[in-house]
């Protein structure tokens, strides 16, 4: 795992100074293109906030078929550092969730498998950090999953936890961020160092047109300078 403690201090400070202590905050991370380091930054941000959390930090991975966040925390190295991944927990809070599987699977006894069943969260060791895993292996041929508006779910989420960090697939391969943006408190954009600024501006405008709010930009300079960390601009 990359240690981005110093690089993310600005964003962590922004969260801690502006967060409503009575309610939780929902922040999404999305890249202009793939391979911008979104998952690394989202994971590092969640890990930095979790130690001072009282109600918990939930890390949602919306790349449902890959489950990279869960896979990372399940490695032997991560288990030694943070402890083992816990048993699956229900993240729906008795609300209709923001993910939907269609068409619904019908069991042999005639019961439908709800969309809620497919996604669970797991506690990481004894930390106040929870990571999601989507049961993609249970999908049948012809089934698909997508994100939908779920304002009531996220409002209930804010009452239950301190912070939700949402790792969103890059805009160049998914429209997920446009469905999610109106329901979160802020979106952090990621772009490669030296990339076309017009693409970043276009994504910001697209998110804001959908009802979302962009709160910062992370420029990934790893590919520009070997061994260099990531830079953050608020």
Image: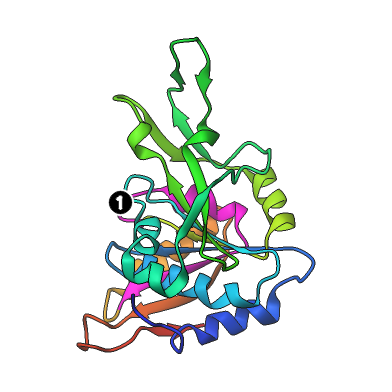
The image quadrant where one finds the N terminus is bottom left
Image side of residue 188 versus residue 51, left or right: left
Drawn side of residue 185 relative to residue 156, left or right: left
Looking at the picture, does residue 28 appear above or below residue 157? below
Residue 6, x across and y down, in percent: 45, 89
Q: Residue at x 63, y 62 (%)?
A: 185
The residue nearer to you, when weighing 149 against 130, is 130
Q: Residue at the right extreme?
A: 22
Q: Secondary structure at mark 1?
A: loop
User: What residue sits right under mark 1 in the picture?
Assistant: 173
Tell me, yes or no, if residue 200 can be seen here.
no
Q: Residue at x 52, y 86 (%)?
A: 9
Residue toward you, 74 or 4:
74
Q: Is residue 105 visible?
A: yes
Q: How many marks?
A: 1
Q: Which residues are magenta?
A: 170-192
Residue 215 x %, y %: 55, 72
Inspect the magenta stretch and tell me whether residue 173 lies in it. Answer: yes
Colour setting: rainbow
Q: Dot 1 surroundings within 10 Å: few (below 14), some, or many (20 or more)? A: few
Residue at the location (60% across, 57% down)? 184
Asked if residue 174 lies in the magenta stretch, the reply is yes
Q: Nearer the viewer, residue 178 or 143?
A: 143
Q: Is residue 20 left or right of residue 168?
A: right
Q: Position of residue 16 (x, y in %)?
A: 66, 79
Specify the quadrant of the image occupied by residue 229: bottom left
Against 24, is 194 above or below?
below
Choose between 40 and 120: the one closer to the eye: 120
């Amino acid at each position: 795992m990359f240690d981005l403690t110093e690089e993310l201090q600005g964003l962590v400070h922004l969260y801690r100074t502006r967060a409503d202590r009575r309610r939780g905050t929902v922040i999404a991370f999305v890249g202009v293109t793939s391979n911008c380091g979104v998952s690394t930054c989202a994971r590092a941000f969640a890990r930095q906030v979790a130690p001072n959390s009282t109600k918990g930090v939930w890390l949602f991975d919306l790349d449902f078929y890959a489950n990279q966040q869960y896979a990372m925390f399940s490695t032997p190295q991560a288990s030694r550092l943070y402890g083992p991944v816990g048993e699956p927990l229900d993240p729906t809070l008795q609300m209709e969730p923001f993910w939907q599987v269609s068409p619904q699977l019908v069991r042999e006894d005639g019961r439908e498998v709800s969309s809620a069943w497919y996604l669970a969260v797991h506690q990481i060791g004894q930390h106040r950090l929870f990571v999601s895993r989507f049961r993609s292996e249970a999908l049948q041929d012809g089934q698909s999953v997508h994100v939908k508006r779920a304002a009531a779910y996220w409002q209930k989420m804010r009452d239950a936890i301190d912070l939700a960090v949402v790792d969103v697939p890059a805009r160049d391969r998914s429209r997920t961020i446009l469905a999610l943006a109106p329901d979160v408190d802020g979106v952090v954009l990621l772009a490669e160092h030296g990339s076309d600024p017009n693409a970043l501006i276009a994504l910001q405008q697209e998110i804001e047109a959908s009802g979302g709010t962009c709160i910062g930009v992370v420029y990934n300079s790893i590919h520009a300078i070997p061994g260099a960390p990531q830079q953050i601009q608020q």
